[in-house]
């Protein structure tokens, strides 16, 4: 009987509480949002435009509310994209300015508009060619 009690006790200890998982997932989205706003100097308006989510949702997730899986994925992708762009532009400020300037590579659209249309693959393609040094 003592063996059952110990193994049962071990099982209970090894399973994390559901509330901890929710907080952990919510906080990762909050951290990514903080990275976009604080590290890259993006306004809430720009974060809303880049993500396609409402200002209310962004504010809620920033305060630790658990985001949906698609939202978590979106913010992970945005952070990765910004890291890659900063590597190329060598400045966070230059990256933010570049996002808002019309670009011939995107038929006169701004990179921000390209992301809003769900065409960030075009920007990733540009990043690839700039990193590799080969022409488009």
Image (spheres, rainbow, N blue to C red):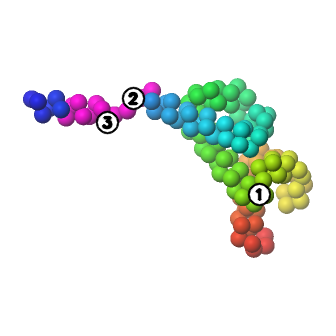
Q: Position of residue 68 (x, y in %)?
A: 57, 34
Residue sitting nearer the eye, 53 or 19? 19
Per the model, the C-alpha gap separating discs 3 and 1 is 44 Å
Structural distance between the alpha carbons of marks 3 and 2: 10 Å
**Type of secondary structure dominating the magenta stretch:** helix
Please provide the residue range marked out in magenta: 7-19
The residue identified by callout 3 is: 14
Residue 83 percent coordinates (x, y):
68, 53
Residue indicated by mark 2: 17
Q: Is residue 114 visible?
A: no
Q: CA distance from mark 2 to mark 1?
A: 43 Å
- Outermost residue, bottom side: 134
Circle 1 residue? 90
Say which residue appears at 59% left-offset and 40% top-offset: 72
Instruction: Tell me whether the residue at label 3 lies in contact with that at label 1, contact meaning CB atoms closer than 8 angstroms.
Output: no
* Magenta stretch holds residue 8: yes
Is there CB contact under 8 Å for labels 3 and 2? no
Circle 3 residues within 10 Å: few <14, some 14–19, many ≥20: few
């Amino acid at each position: 009987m003592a063996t059952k009690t110990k193994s049962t006790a071990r099982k209970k200890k090894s399973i994390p509480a559901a509330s901890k998982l929710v907080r952990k997932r919510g906080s990762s989205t909050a951290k990514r949002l903080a990275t976009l706003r604080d590290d890259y100097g993006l306004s809430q308006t720009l974060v809303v435009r880049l993500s396609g989510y409402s200002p209310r949702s962004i504010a809620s997730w920033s305060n630790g509310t658990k985001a949906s899986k698609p939202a978590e994925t979106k913010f992970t992708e945005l952070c990765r994209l910004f890291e890659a762009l900063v590597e190329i532009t060598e400045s966070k400020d230059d990256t933010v300015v570049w996002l808002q300037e019309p670009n011939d590579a995107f038929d006169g659209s701004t990179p921000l508009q390209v992301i809003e249309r769900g065409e960030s693959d075009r920007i990733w393609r540009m990043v690839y060619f700039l990193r590799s040094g080969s022409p488009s």
